[in-house]
């Protein structure tokens, strides 16, 4: 029996549809609402190091979610409660019982009641709910109508049999489905309003949104909303050996900042006051746009870690700090998806590409290019970096606990508590480092022929700085026991190729950067002689434990021993690139001897003559 599609005159089906749609949105939204706003990449035994130094960052991320999203969430919760209440009220009402017609329940009888019992119950209920008794009450009329239906269904033998077998007095029914449309939408008096809304929605608003999206997509070069005009500016100002100061000035020329900055005259004077507080005045501007100076001053104030609240005479410092955070957050996208592709892919400038990556390191960690990498650690301040300070974090990890305490707790530095000292040491030991292994992916008898395609596989394994320091200390030991120990340590942690489907690298410890970032690494392949890029740099975003990077390039024409270098550098932490050289020998492809060719041709002739003889015999 064919089904029927009907309009729900009661309008209750639309509430069920709305309830389902709200649950589809609210279930994942509640999960992410209860989930912590910021996740931390904790090394082993990290304690609370990451959590305590990132409280300000967590608050910024929570505030950045915006009141609009929160308002939408709570409005959906309220609508869910109202919809549930409406459905419950309808299901418990008289109209809701129509969907479950049970004549025995209506008459207050048990299954299998006799005809006499049915008639007695009908007479009793008719006296109670007859419309003449209650003066035409609508509710009473509805109840009385159902009593009459139940009486007819149980006194007619055929109807009673149909209900007991099929659940309906008229026998098996066709499947009925209702359109989930609100009742007011199908009412006759609202037809012109509905048509007008449909026209505005599908003929005006929807085409306008599609055209706007297409127009907006044409302005940007990537999904990170980097303007094409900004990329053109990067390409125009790009050159080899660009220093970081020049890269900052080029970055400040991005048109994204022009719409972001709208400062008054008094606030422009505040920019001058901030610039005067720099330890070293920046170079003179070559790009004279009005907003470029503001961007550059706020970026340098971020790098120098200047607290704007401590500068006297500033007008509206809270607005300047908010603008500074917006500029810093946008600068990361502009560097990764605008400047680096231009310098590394378009121009293939090695030194400029490395400086651009270093600029991104500075941006995430909030340090100046001349500052010590130790400032990435918690509880370390500029005044603590005296002559006894180690130059790098790896050197700090190499120090014994007694040497660390003697440096951190001397008379020139404020004393650190045991908890602060433990957090500093734990975080320094948990900083990432890499173990690099290079090998060739060969398919032709382990030989690299001239002008053939060379596949260089870079195997990367992520370890902590402490583990890397132990490996280096064992390898640098001159005793045979030390070398054996280093080899056994490496064998205990073999390279394992792991597949990560959609997994990103661990989050970066960057409490000063306003957003959450995941670790990023760049792999550069260079010629060993002239230090020129053989291929564009590759960014690694899925280095959780280990991964592979494949470089495929054309082998040189000259058969001899060639050497390349692979540089791996982080764009998240202030550290120098790890370099490893690789040598491979290019050989010329030898031609086959003439005698072998002649033998092959004679064998082919003999085989062809035998085949022709067999064909003639068969004929």
Image: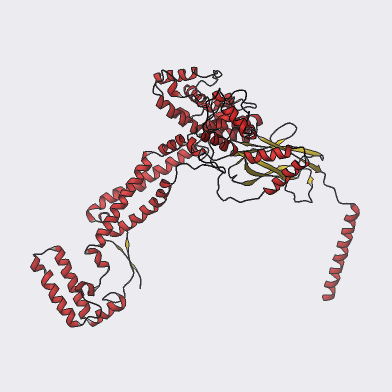
Whether residue 494 is visible here, answered yes or no, is no
Q: Position of residue 451 (x, y in %)?
A: 76, 43
In the depicted view, which residue is nearer to us: 412 or 616? 412
| Left or right of 587 in this view: 86 | left
Q: Position of residue 496 (x, y in %)?
A: 66, 50
154 over 418 or under it: above or below? below
Task: Please give the name of the residue rendered at 89% of the width and 60% of the height, measured from the top-left corner.
Answer: 602
The type of colouring in the image is: secondary structure
- For residue 365, which quarter of the picture? top right
108 over 235 or under it: above or below? below
Question: How many callouts does the rendering have?
Answer: 0
Q: Position of residue 97 (x, y in %)?
A: 24, 66
The N terminus - image quarter:
bottom left
Q: Position of residue 424 (x, y in %)?
A: 55, 34
In the depicted view, which residue is nearer to us: 337 or 382? 382
524 over 314 or under it: above or below? below
Task: Please give the name of the residue rendered at 16% of the width and 64% of the height, measured from the top-left corner.
Answer: 139
In the depicted view, which residue is nearer to us: 442 or 484? 484
Task: Please give the name of the residue rendered at 56% of the width and 42% of the height, measured from the top-left corner.
Answer: 43
Task: Please give the name of the residue rendered at 48% of the width and 37% of the height, measured from the top-left corner.
Answer: 52
| Left or right of 276 in this view: 152 | left
- For residue 539, which quarter of the picture? top right
The C terminus - image quarter:
bottom right
Q: Which residue is most to the right?
A: 595
Whether residue 46 is visible here, answered yes or no, is yes
366 over 128 or under it: above or below? above
């Amino acid at each position: 029996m064919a089904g029927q599609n009907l309009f729900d005159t009661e309008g209750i089906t639309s509430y069920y549809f709305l309830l389902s749609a709200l649950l589809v949105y609210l279930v994942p939204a509640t999960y992410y609402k209860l989930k912590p706003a910021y996740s931390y990449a904790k090394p082993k035994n990290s304690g609370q190091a990451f959590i305590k130094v990132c409280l300000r960052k967590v608050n910024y991320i929570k505030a950045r979610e915006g009141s609009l999203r929160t308002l939408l969430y709570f409005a959906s919760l309220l609508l869910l409660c109202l919809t549930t209440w409406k459905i419950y009220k309808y299901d418990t009402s008289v109209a809701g019982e129509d969907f479950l017609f049970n004549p025995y329940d209506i008459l207050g009888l048990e299954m299998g009641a006799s005809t006499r019992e049915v008639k007695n119950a009908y007479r009793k209920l008719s006296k109670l709910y007859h419309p003449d008794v209650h003066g035409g009450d609508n509710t009473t009329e509805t109840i009385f109508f159902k009593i009459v239906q139940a009486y007819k269904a149980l006194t007619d033998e055929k109807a009673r049999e149909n209900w007991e077998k099929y659940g309906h007095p008229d026998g098996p029914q066709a499947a009925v489905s209702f359109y989930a449309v609100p009742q007011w939408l199908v009412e006759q008096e609202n037809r012109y309003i509905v048509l007008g809304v449909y026209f505005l929605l599908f003929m005006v608003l929807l085409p306008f949104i599609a055209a706007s999206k297409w127009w907006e997509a044409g302005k940007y070069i990537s999904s990170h909303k980097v303007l094409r005009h900004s990329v053109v500016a990067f390409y125009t100002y790009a050159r080899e050996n660009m220093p970081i100061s020049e890269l900052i000035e080029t970055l400040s020329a991005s048109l994204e900042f022009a719409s972001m900055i709208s400062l008054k005259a008094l606030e422009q004077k505040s920019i001058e006051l901030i610039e005067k507080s720099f330890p070293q005045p920046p170079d003179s501007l070559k790009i004279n746009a009005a907003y470029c100076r503001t961007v550059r001053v706020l970026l340098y104030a971020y790098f120098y870690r200047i607290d704007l609240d401590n500068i006297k005479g500033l007008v509206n410092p809270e607005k300047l700090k908010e603008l500074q955070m917006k500029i810093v957050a946008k600068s990361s996208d502009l560097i990764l998806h605008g400047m680096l592709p231009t310098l590394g892919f378009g121009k293939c400038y090695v030194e400029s590409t490395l400086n651009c990556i270093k600029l991104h390191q500075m941006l995430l960690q909030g340090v100046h290019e001349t500052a010590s990498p130790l400032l990435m650690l918690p509880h370390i301040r500029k005044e603590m970096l005296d002559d006894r300070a180690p130059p790098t974090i790896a050197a700090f990890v190499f120090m014994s606990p007694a040497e660390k305490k003697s440096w951190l707790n001397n008379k020139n530095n404020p004393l650190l508590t045991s908890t602060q000292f433990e957090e500093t040491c734990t975080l320094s030991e948990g900083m990432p480092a890499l173990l690099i292994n290079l090998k060739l992916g060969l398919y032709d008898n382990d030989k690299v022929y001239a002008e053939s395609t060379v596949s260089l596989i870079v195997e990367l394994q992520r370890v902590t700085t402490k583990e890397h320091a132990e490996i280096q200390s064992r390898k640098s030991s001159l005793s045979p026991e030390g070398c054996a120990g280093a080899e056994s340590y490496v064998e205990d942690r073999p390279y394992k190729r792991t597949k990560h489907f959609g997994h990103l690298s661990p989050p970066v410890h960057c409490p000063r950067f306003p957003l959450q970032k995941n670790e990023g690494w760049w792999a550069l392949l260079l010629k060993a002689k002239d230090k020129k890029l053989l291929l564009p740099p590759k960014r690694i975003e899925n280095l959780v434990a280990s991964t592979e990077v494949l470089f495929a390039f054309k082998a040189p024409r000259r058969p001899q021993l060639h050497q390349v270098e692979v540089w791996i550098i982080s764009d998240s932490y202030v550290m120098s690139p790890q370099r490893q050289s690789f040598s491979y020998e290019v050989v010329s492809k030898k031609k086959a001897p003439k005698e072998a060719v002649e033998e092959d041709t004679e064998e082919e002739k003999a085989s062809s003559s035998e085949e022709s003889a067999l064909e003639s015999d068969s004929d």
